[in-house]
Amino acid sequence: MRRLIVGAAVAGVVLTLAAATGVSAHWQAQQRIDLSAASSGDLDIDASWKSTPNWTAMYPADSREGVIVVTPTVTGQTMRWRLRVTSAVAPALADHITFRAWEGACGGGTPIALDGNGPYGMRTSFEVCIRYTLDAATPRSVSGLSASPAITVIAEQVSS
């Protein structure tokens, strides 16, 4: 009987915390894997601007470039990861702005694919160049709108 009371008290605390935050999720999944394909270790990534693009006064057919320094921290002998870079802009300009990213120099480095580049193991800091181009046929009706770009640098662990 004592075990039931303690269990009910713990469940009550969990439900109270979930209700206080307004959102909760709990699940458990199991997956059988071949041990030769397992990856282990820790992965952390830091991304910081080396040169920030000047987003103001962008005219049709103009491009803006910036450089992000990506510093991965990878531990573990079998850890492999993939780099993805995504972008979002203001919805009113989404059909008129093209986003591209490269490892290395803009236009001359290795293009970063939509599903990412890699897999990588341990590596040192490297540069990612990003470029936004405003389409030459952009209508005047969107003149003066802010692109409000949001760039996300993602490191995803992948199997080796």
Image (cartoon, rainbow, N blue to C red):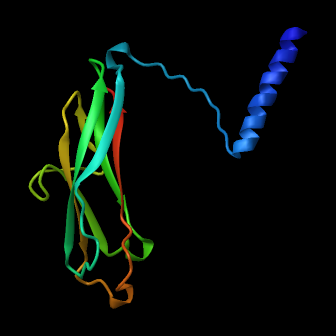
Query: Foreground: 106 or 159?
Result: 106
Vertical order, 143 against 37 (above or below):
below
Query: Image quadrant of residue 29?
Result: top right
Query: Image quadrant of residue 155?
Result: top left
Residue ranking furthest to the right? 1
Is 17 situated left or right of 53 in this image? Answer: right
Residue ranking furthest to the bottom? 140
- Residue 105 in picture, x, y percent from top left: 11, 54
Image point 86% across, 15% down: which residue?
A: 4
Which corner quadrant holds the C terminus? top left
Image point 28% across, 42% down: which residue?
A: 83
Query: Foreground: 22 or 39?
Result: 22
Vertical order, 9 against 63 (above or below):
above
- Residue 84 in picture, x, y percent from top left: 31, 46
Query: Image quadrant of residue 77?
Result: top left
Which corner quadrant holds the N terminus? top right
Vertical order, 152 against 81 (above or below):
below
- Residue 70 in picture, x, y percent from top left: 25, 43
- Residue 114 in picture, x, y percent from top left: 30, 51
Image point 19% across, 31% down: which residue?
A: 123
Is 132 situated left or right of 90 in this image? Answer: left
